[in-house]
Image (cartoon, grey):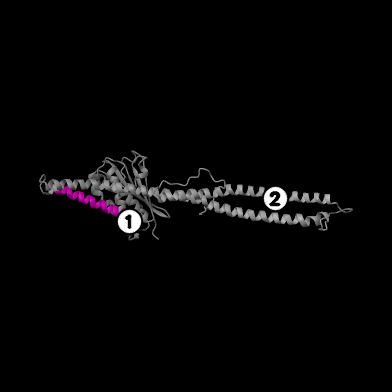
């Protein structure tokens, strides 16, 4: 028969107590039948008792023997009471020890069967306080929560990718079928939307690939000490025409004494470009975008600040999530793939840096990158 940990502990405890109880009885019996006569009564071991004036009578000897029997019974009774008390205490103590293990086992079985909501919950808190088993249960709950969150992210990403692919594929299919059916002629005017959707799909797939590599820690980086001021000025120059078209002012406030920064210049240009492109998307005409830098002993900070509409408080924690758009009404063509800021965050973290967003509705948005100095 298979015994659980609780009953194994109880059996071991019972055996220990029983052996100790038996030893007490044997030793006590030996003392009360032999040594007690000699030490307390001066007996000669022949069935007669020696008193102060010589031999005692048989009646008194029987009385003394009865007293010895009572002592033995008291010892036996005391040992039995001790055994029961030890078993009772052991039952509650071992139950308190094994209850979290039982719950952990049940939760692990549920998790193995696909129930990611399984948790270790003790309705009867252990009277022993926090111990290694309690810490194990807490670690299990943390692991289960992480698995559940990862599974939810995976499902959300699958749904988002399917949603992002559905629209361009539908446009391509509709145009191509219309041309095949003779509704549209095969000319540049009707082929251009198909090509645009192909470019959109290509960009989406490349963004997903970049994001997957970055999150897996496998994004290839060619890092070297880089003049950050020159890099930022190059990125700003590439957006001047677009900013002028949108009547948005681009400003540069770059510190003159920036130390070299160890980074991949192409990936960092991509990251800063994402931030400026995102700022242009939400900054109205006659607004401004400022790219500023500062440095301290440990890091260099790049700040991209705009005078746009800002981000609502409920949307701010999600701006770096995949496919997240604060403005749900924007089309895919004008609103981007929804992966730009997620890619930017992954690239910055791959460089050992950090990125954060600070914003209030109607007061613009600040995106701040912190990068460590070159070694």
Residue 370 in the figure: left or right of residue 160: right
Give me the C-alpha separation between circle 1 and circle 2. 75 Å
Q: Nearer the viewer, residue 337 or 278?
A: 337
User: Whole-percent x and y of residue 318?
Assistant: 35, 44
Q: Nearer the viewer, residue 323 or 346?
A: 323
Q: Which is the main secondary structure of the residues drawn in magenta?
A: helix
Q: Which mark is residue 328?
A: none
| Viewer-side label of 1, 2 | 2
In the structure shown, which secondary structural element does the residue marked by tag 1 occupy?
helix
**Residue range (magenta):** 191-215
Magenta stretch: residue 238 in it? no
- Going from the N terminus, do you reach mark 1 or mark 2 first? 2
In the structure shown, which secondary structural element does the residue marked by tag 2 occupy?
helix
Quadrant that contains the C terminus: bottom left
Residue 84 in the figure: left or right of residue 294: right
Give the residue at x 55% y 52%: 7
User: Whole-percent x and y of residue 93?
Assistant: 58, 48
Residue 93 in the figure: left or right of residue 256: right
Q: Which mark is residue 76?
A: 2
Magenta stretch: residue 201 in it? yes
Q: Residues at badges 1 and 2 in contact (C-beta under 8 Å)?
A: no
- Can you name the residue that lies furthest to the front here? 58
Q: Which mark is residue 213?
A: 1
User: Whole-percent x and y of residue 290?
Assistant: 32, 47
User: Whole-percent x and y of residue 223?
Assistant: 34, 60
Residue 139 in the figure: left or right of residue 267: right
Is residue 338 shown to the viewer in this render?
Answer: no
């Amino acid at each position: 028969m298979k015994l659980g940990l609780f009953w194994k502990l109880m059996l071991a405890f019972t055996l220990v107590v029983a052996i100790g109880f038996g030893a007490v009885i044997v030793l006590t019996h030996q003392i009360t039948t032999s040594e007690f006569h000699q030490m307390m009564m001066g007996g000669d071991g022949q069935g007669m008792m020696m008193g102060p004036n010589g031999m005692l009578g048989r009646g008194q000897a029987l009385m003394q023997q009865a007293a010895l029997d009572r002592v033995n019974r008291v010892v036996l009774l005391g040992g039995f009471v001790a055994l029961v008390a030890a078993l009772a205490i052991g039952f509650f103590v071992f139950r308190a020890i094994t209850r979290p293990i039982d719950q952990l086992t049940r939760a692990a079985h549920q998790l193995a069967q696909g129930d990611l909501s399984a948790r270790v919950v003790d309705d009867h808190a252990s009277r022993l306080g926090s111990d290694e088993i309690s810490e194990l249960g807490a670690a299990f709950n943390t692991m289960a929560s992480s698995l559940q969150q990862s599974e939810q992210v995976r499902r959300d990403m699958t749904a988002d990718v399917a949603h992002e692919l559905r629209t361009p594929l539908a446009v391509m299919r509709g145009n191509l079928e219309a041309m095949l059916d003779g509704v549209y002629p095969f000319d540049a005017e009707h082929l251009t939307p198909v090509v645009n959707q192909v470019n959109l799909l290509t960009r989406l797939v490349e963004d997903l690939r970049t994001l997957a590599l970055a999150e897996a820690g496998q994004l290839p980086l060619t890092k070297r000490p880089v003049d950050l001021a020159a890099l930022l000025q190059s990125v700003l120059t590439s957006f001047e025409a677009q900013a002028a078209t949108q009547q948005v002012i681009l400003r540069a406030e770059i510190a003159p004494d920036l130390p070299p920064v160890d980074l991949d210049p192409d990936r960092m240009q991509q990251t800063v470009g994402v931030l400026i492109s995102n700022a242009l998307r939400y900054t109205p005409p006659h607004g401004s975008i400022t790219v500023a830098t500062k440095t301290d002993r440990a890091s260099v900070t790049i700040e991209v600040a705009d005078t746009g509409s800002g981000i609502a408080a409920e949307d701010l924690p999600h701006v770096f999530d995949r496919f997240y758009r604060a403005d749900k009404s924007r089309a895919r063509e004008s609103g981007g793939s929804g992966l730009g800021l997620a890619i930017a965050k992954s690239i910055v973290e791959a460089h050992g840096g950090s990125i954060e967003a600070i914003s209030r509705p109607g007061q613009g948005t600040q995106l701040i990158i912190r990068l460590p100095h070159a070694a």
